Image (tube, rainbow, N blue to C red):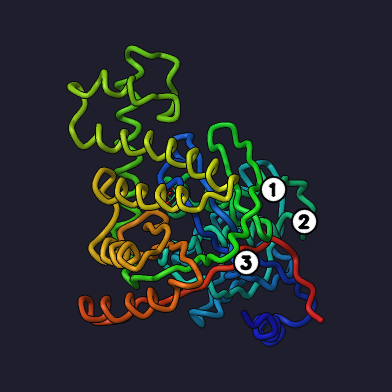
Amino acid sequence: MNYNRLYEKFQELFGKGATLFVSPGRVNLIGEHTDYNGGFVLPAAIDKVIAVAIKPNDTNRIRAYSLDLSDAAEFDLSEKPNKQWASYIYGVVAEIGKKGLTIGGFDCVFGGNVPLGAGLSSSAALESVFAYALNELYQLGLSRFDMAKIGQAAEHNAVGVRCGIMDQFASVFGQKGHLIQLDCRSLEYELVPFDPKGYRLVLLDTQVKHSLASSEYNVRRAECEAGVSTVKKRYPDVQLLRDVTLEMLDEFQAELPESTYRRCRYVIEENLRLLTATAALKASDYVTFGKMMYGSHEGLSTQYNVSCAELDFLVDIARKCNVLGARMMGGGFGGCTINLVSDEAYDAFIQEAKTLYKQSFGREPRVYEVHISDGSRQLKLD
Ligand code: GLA
């Protein structure tokens, strides 16, 4: 990431005196589509970030420039812009306003190296970096929890995806060398050291842009909520799928549409897999951890139905190449697989994945080696 370019562009457009902030994208080792069901997730911030050079401008207007799109937008603090990328910024500003906090207009240039639409949460990184920067610039006194929730609310209200808290949480709270085991019901979290000696984390990007993702995402969430409201009839204390056991769900199998039953079953099983996986991780039992990753993929593909042919194909290759664990990652319908692979198996796996994927889909997958990094922060340029 070339921060100097960002800073120079700011100078060219708006003059001197900008402050620089970054927020990262994320990976998630296991626990997919569990966050909005009050379940567990195991994400980490990565060394791919969105950065912003920003400075208050003493007006009530926002002047924003996207370095990667070479596109500018100017809008009032209270005016929804008509450009999609600018609505993320507006969304954060609007949510800060809803908390009764006051900010002024600002100038900004942002850009980054989180691949877009690859399931690495570039949008959460964008929301988080603005929440973090505005909190610092205007001394709003927001906690990191507040910032993550502001980003999530921006995604709901300005973008229209009813996402859970995982992505924004990981982007804001990430810590180098650690996974975050987050309980999305209580928001309690534990930092789990992650340094699997002899293994690497690598992402294979199908380069299928998940265009179905936002509409189908909201449908999945609604299916889970429908399951909960049926179970609630006899178990009034149940608020979220997290509160439902497999035994309880089975009592309702005949009453629930088949697809709703499968969606709910997947979520409950995924929470159990995550608990097995984190216990294994703490015991350095990567074999069990890897099995849980494959189990997660299987569930996402056949029960939750959010995978696609390209993702399934790459996970199959991983299995054949003795990769310890592999699964699709994020919302689904495209984006990346995440793979935990031993140093010995690595080269052959990547080669095989490139060759076979190209034969079937006409292009190679992109390969990203992942390094676990810190969350939202200010950057000082030398
Ligand atoms: C997207 C959402 C997250 C989470 C994942 C699936 O990344 O933004 O909140 O639900 O999908 O686990």
Task: Give 374 or 230, whichever is nearer the viewer.
Answer: 374
Q: Mark 3: which secondary structure?
A: strand
User: Is residue 324 visible to us here?
Assistant: yes
Ligand 1 under 8 Å from disc 2 Cβ = no
Query: Label 3 vs label 1: CA separation?
Result: 24 Å
- Extreme-right residue of the structure: 382
Which quadrant does the N terminus fall into?
Answer: bottom right
369 lies left or right of 238: right
Give the numbered dot on residue 138.
2
Place residue 251 in its image quadrant: top left
Nearer-N-terminus badge (2/3): 3
Which mark is first along the chain, 1 or 3?
3
* Circle nearer the viewer, 2 or 3: 2
Q: Is residue 66 left or right of residue 311?
A: right
Inspect the image, locate mark 2, and give the three-letter code of the amino acid beneath it.
Answer: Tyr
Query: Viewer-nearest of labels 3 and 1?
Result: 1
**Numbered badge on residue 62:** 3
